[in-house]
């Protein structure tokens, strides 16, 4: 039977920080390379927590990536013969990504996008709701709650700066379950942010 191998698709890998999104993205990239596919990897230029030109996981695995300041720049870098496009930290990318992804998938390209589905207040993050709606496949990962050890779907911000975007890693955030997660508006959260 003929199996059509070149159908385009959008895969979204989401979940809180430390849930293994970057590890999973890197795993899929490596397998595509083993399959001898032409892969291009991008990340938003503002995410420089480990390496400006690589996707890096908290467990130190990394893979080279082209940093792009916006989706116009991303589109300029796309090669005509690309077969797999991997994107990390897509919650920081602009809405212009949606038509680019749709065009790629329509042309038979496999797009794999990793990003935070929720911000540290537990609210939908940037374009992620749109991407999740458009996705053919969704993988929602969980981390381990740093307070109680349960599965964690939320990201707790440990420092108070305001704004949705604070690029940082272990020192500024930790994974929490729904029960242990605190927002600045809640009483417990304010106590946490005041450092008491
Ligand atoms: P993400 O891209 O979702 O932030 P990473 O792939 O960068 O996740 O990192 C996942 C790794 O982080 C895990 O394999 C583990 O080694 C480490 N880690 C640190 N804290 C936690 C935690 N609270 N829960 C799960 N993994 C954690
Ligand atoms: Zn917990």
Image: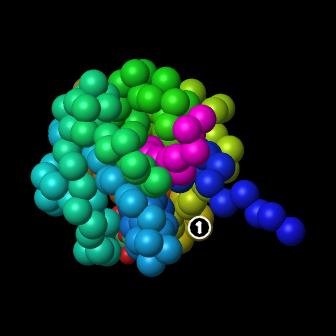
Q: Position of residue 186 (x, y in %)?
A: 46, 32
Q: Is residue 96 visible?
A: yes
> Looking at the image, which residue is at 36% across and 24% down?
94
Q: Looking at the image, which is closer to me, 138 or 176? A: 138
Please give the residue where the numbered disc 1 appears in the rendered image: 150
> Looking at the image, which residue is at 29% across and 74% down?
61
The verdict on residue 103 being magenta is no
Q: Is residue 143 left or right of residue 65?
A: right
Q: Is residue 165 above or below residue 141?
A: above
> Looking at the image, which residue is at 52% across and 30% down?
103
Q: Is residue 16 visible?
A: no
Mark 1 CB near ligand 2 (8 Å cut): yes
Q: Please give the count of numbered marks on the rendered protein.
A: 1
Q: Is residue 28 above or below residue 67?
A: below
Q: Position of residue 137 (x, y in %)?
A: 66, 50
Dividing the image into 4 quarters, which one contains the N terminus? bottom right
Report the residue that reaches farthest toward the bottom: 34
Magenta residues span: 105-116
Q: Looking at the image, which is closer to me, 150 or 193? A: 150
Rendering colour mode:
rainbow
Q: Is residue 30 left or right of residue 102?
A: left
Q: Secondary structure at mark 1?
A: loop
Q: Looking at the image, which is closer to me, 135 or 124? A: 135
Residues packed near mark 1 inside 10 Å, few (<14), some (14 to 19) or many (20 plus): some
The verdict on residue 109 being magenta is yes
> Looking at the image, which residue is at 26% across and 69% down?
62
Which image quadrant for residue 162?
Answer: top left
């Amino acid at each position: 039977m003929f199996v059509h191998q070149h159908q385009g698709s959008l895969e979204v890998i989401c979940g809180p920080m430390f849930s293994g999104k970057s590890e999973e993205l890197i795993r899929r990239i490596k397998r595509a390379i083993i399959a001898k596919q032409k892969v291009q990897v991008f990340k938003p230029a503002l995410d420089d927590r480990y390496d400006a030109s690589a996707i890096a996981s908290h467990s130190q695995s990394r893979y080279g990536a082209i940093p792009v300041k916006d989706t116009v720049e991303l589109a300029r870098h796309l090669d005509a013969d690309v077969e797999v496009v991997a994107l990390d930290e897509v919650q920081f990318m602009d809405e212009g990504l949606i038509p680019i992804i749709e065009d790629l998938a329509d042309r038979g390209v496999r797009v794999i996008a990793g990003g935070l589905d929720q911000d540290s207040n537990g609210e939908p993050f940037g374009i992620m709701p749109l991407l999740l709606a458009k996705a053919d496949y969704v993988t929602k990962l969980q981390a381990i709650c740093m307070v109680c050890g349960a599965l964690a779907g939320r990201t707790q911000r440990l420092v108070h700066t305001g704004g949705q975007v604070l690029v940082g890693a272990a020192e500024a955030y930790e994974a929490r379950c729904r029960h242990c997660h605190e927002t600045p508006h809640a009483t417990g959260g304010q106590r946490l942010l005041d450092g008491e």
